[in-house]
Amino acid sequence: MQTGSCRIIGGRWRGRKIKFDDADGLRPTTDRIRETVFNWLQPYIQQSYCLDLFAGSGVLGFEAFSRGASEVMLIEKNIKTVKSIKHNISVLDAEGMSIQQQDALLWLSSSGLDERLKHHYNLVFLDPPFHTDLLANSSALLESSGCLSDDAIIYVEHAVDADVELPKPWFCLKEKRAGQVSYKLFERRG
């Protein structure tokens, strides 16, 4: 098993490294992009209820929690990756972070979703594997699931060449490009 690592770049765990299983297709958000994204998120992150739908390495969720999010829910399908995230949660003693091993689309469309929610998420990371229809499908399900706050902030990352159609109530606040990655910050205006 190959492992990778990412450095948390801000907050109480600044400089700490998290290790993860280097699974097929896993591409953690780079330090450079994360620095920009978390500068964008600074006004929204304190005491936020955060959802990371395609957690992968978990670095976006750990970064959010390190910088003051109240709770972080990570959803990840790959069992080895989930074990790595659980290990990192334990090592950092990150009470308030939790992970569920499940397909993100199934989690969003589950009839029991309302029972699992203590509150609506007001910060969401949506960074599915590139060159799939997962972004369109997950954003539509996310919008219809009832788990978003009216003014939720949604971070989206996708391939530059992707044809992206997102829900109508999502208004693009900021966007940038780094190589073949396009990353954007949306506000839900519900």
Image: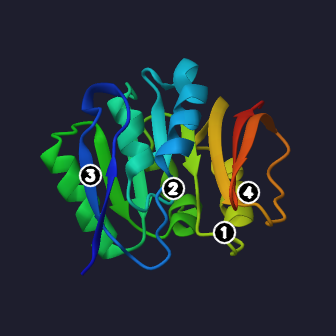
Does label 3 or label 2 sit earlier along the sequence?
3
Q: Is residue 134 shown left or right of residue 161?
A: left
Q: Earlier in the sequence, mark 1 or mark 2?
A: 2
Q: Viewer-nearest of labels 3 and 4?
A: 3
> At label 4, which amino acid type do we have?
Ala
Provide the residue designation for mark 3.
18
Which residue in the structure is indicated by mark 2?
A: 53
Q: In this view, does 87 lie to the left or right of 146?
A: left
Quarter occupied by residue 11: top left
Relative to 16, residue 54 above or below:
below
* In contact (CB < 8 Å): disc 1 and disc 2: no
Quadrant in which the C terminus appears: top right
Mark 4, Cα crowd under 10 Å, few <14 / some 14-19 / many 20+, is some
Give the image location of residue 166, x and y in percent: 80, 52
Q: Residues within 10 Å of mark 1 (few under 14, many from 20)?
A: some
Label 2 sits on a secondary structure element that is loop
Q: Nearer the viewer, residue 11 or 154?
A: 11
Q: How far apart are marks 4 and 2 (CA)?
A: 13 Å
Mark closer to the chain start, 4 or 2: 2
Query: Could you give the CA–CA distance between mark 4 and mark 1, rounded to whole angstroms?
Result: 10 Å
Q: Earlier in the sequence, mark 3 or mark 4?
A: 3
Q: Measured from the top left, where is residue 92 in percent x and y?
A: 18, 42
Query: Gap between marks 3 and 4, in whole Å?
Result: 31 Å
- Residue at image position (44%, 20%) is 46
Q: In this view of the protein, which residue sits in the foreground, 97 or 88?
A: 88
Q: Residue 86: give x, y in percent of width and height.
A: 23, 57
